[in-house]
Each structure stands twice: as structure tokens, then as C-alpha cells.
Image (tube, rainbow, N blue to C red):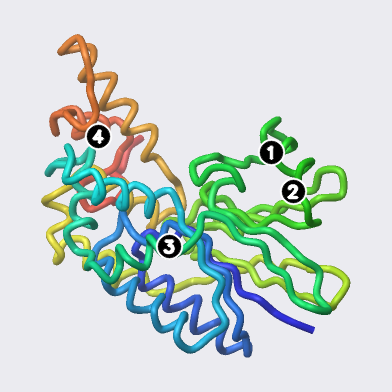
Amino acid sequence: MMDIAVFGDIHGNHSALQACIDYAVGRGITNFVLLGDYVTDCPNPQKTMELIYVLKQYFNTYIIRGNREEYLLAYKKTGAGNWKKGSASGSLLYTYENLTDKDFNFFDSIPNYGKFEMKGMPSFEYCHGSPESTSELLMREKRNTKKVLAHLNTPLLLHGHVHIQDTYVYRGKKAVSPGSIGVPWYHGGKTQFCILHGNGKTWEEELIQLDYDRKEILKEFKESGLCNIAPAWAAVTMHTIRTGIDLNETILLRAMRLCEQERGAAKWPDIPEKYWAIALKENYIDLAGKEIPHK
């Protein structure tokens, strides 16, 4: 028998990560698979990185990169590019400036994809987006998901990136998304991960949703200055943490559309804050990420 906790899409939410670690360790788990997107979106990424280094030091961990780690590494390697203060790229810039060389070296040292192989246990594969790309979305029933599963060399694929907790079986191959720890969708914003129970023949997934103290992380948005650097983006992220309803793409696309209509073009990250403010208001979200009452 073997149990493995699978953590995906932490996005800098160290409060949620601590709750998930405590729960897993409380159940006697000593094996962890980490599926990437450790930082960006939430404040104080160094606190999340510290927890990951502790896991790595004291437990048996399998760790891969997400698309956010790839963004940060690419930005570092090409020399500082066009990230700037503002809702479009301010959160990325804030994270970048709060990471150390140790963090970048760590991101650089981990692979994009992994295969779990252990004597007496069935093999499985794990990735952030898909085995081919950290940015590919594997949604159930979609053609690309079926294609990935059809080509799988093992019976099971663990993947993140979609932020939706789900299990999907196609032609006898199973894709398990543990959900997002840091910016989870649905379940009222409860933090999500999964535990794999291995009996030597198969892996059975147990999908976990946990309540945790969200006050700590929400307070840090303001205290860290992230709300000033990326006002609307911070508000949308806080709204998702509060509710489990994710509107970041809706608001980003709306802000770009408004900018396009008024200026004739919208080029990320040069989307003026006034368009973000309108997009937030249209979706009944205030700058603290709370719902604006409406009839």
C-alpha cells in the first residue's frame, strides 16, 4: 500500500498550501507530487517557496514545472522585458521581484514532465498542462484530451493547469486533475488536492476539498502592496479565493475589448487601469475582491 498527495496550482497561496500539507501529514502521508504553478497571483511568494523547500527536504517529493515557472524563467533569461506596474502584468512583475536566485535555480533544475516508476507499484505520468506542453488545457471530453490519453504509456495521468478538480476516463486511461490549491474553482473556494491510494495493482484517487483560514492570505494582498501594483488582477484573484468563481479571463478580455473600442487597439500589457475598473464594476466586484450587491 502507498499513498501520495498530489498538489497543483498553488499560485502563491501559502495559507491554503499549509492547510493541505497539515491535512496530508496528519493522515500519515510522506509522498508528494507537485504539479507546478507554485507562484504568481498571490502575495509573498517567498512563503510558498519556503514550504516547498521544507516538503522537498523532509518528504519524498516529485516536482515539475508549470507554465508560470516557465514565464518567470524566460523573463529572467531574456533580460527584463515589458512587465510593468498595472493590472495586466503587475502581478507577474511583483512575483519576479520577490523571488531569489535560489528560486530561479530551483525552477531551472526541475523537469516539465515526470513518470513515476517504483517496483511493485503501477506506473503513472504527471505534468502541469500536458506531457507535451505546460500550457495545454486538458478538459474532459475535448479532442486534445482524448488524443493525449490515447498516446499515454501508463494507465494514469496527473495534470494541473485547469484548476478544476476532475477525473476523466477515456479508453481505459485515466486523467486526474487534483484541482487548484491556491486559486481553486467551485466548491465555494475550498482548497483542493487529491490523494492517490496505491494497492500494487491500481491507483484510486480521493478528491479532497478543505476549508482553510482565507483571512490571512486576503489580508496580505493589501499589506504586501500587491493591490497597488496590480489592482484589478488582485481583486479578481481575491474574488476567486473568496467564492470559487473565476472571472479573470472574462475581466481581462473585457478590459482589452473596452481599450480596443476606445483606442482602436489593445496590446497587452498596455491596458490602462480605467478599462480594468469598468470591467470589474460590470462584473460586480470591488477592489477588495468582494461582490458588489446588485438586484
On the image, the x and y values in percent for residue 239 come to 34, 51
Front disc: 4 or 1 = 1
Residue 155 or residue 79, whichever sits in front: 79
Q: Which mark is residue 281?
A: 4
Circle 1 is placed at which residue position? 145
Query: Distance of mark 3 from mark 4, alpha carbons?
Result: 27 Å
Answer left or right for 153 relative to 74: right
Crowd band around label 4 with a 10 angstrom C-alpha radius: few (<14), some (14–19), many (20+):
some
Label 2: state its secondary structure: strand
Mark 1: give few (<14), some (14-19) or many (20+) Cα within 10 Å.
some
Is residue 209 visible from the viewing direction of this image?
no
**Residue 222 to residue 3: above or below:** above
Q: Nearer the viewer, residue 152 or 230?
A: 152
The kind of residue on which mark 4 rests is: Lys
Looking at the image, is mark 4 or mark 1 earlier in the sequence? 1
Under tag 3, what secondary structure? loop
Q: Earlier in the sequence, mark 1 or mark 2?
A: 1
Q: Which residue is mark 3?
A: 10
Q: CA distance from mark 4 to mark 1?
A: 35 Å
Q: Where 27 falls versus 289 (above or below)?
A: below
From the image, tell me which residue sits under label 2.
168
Determine the CA span between mark 2 and mark 3: 22 Å
Q: Quadrant of the C terminus?
A: top left
Question: In the rendering, which numbered label is found on residue 260?
Answer: none
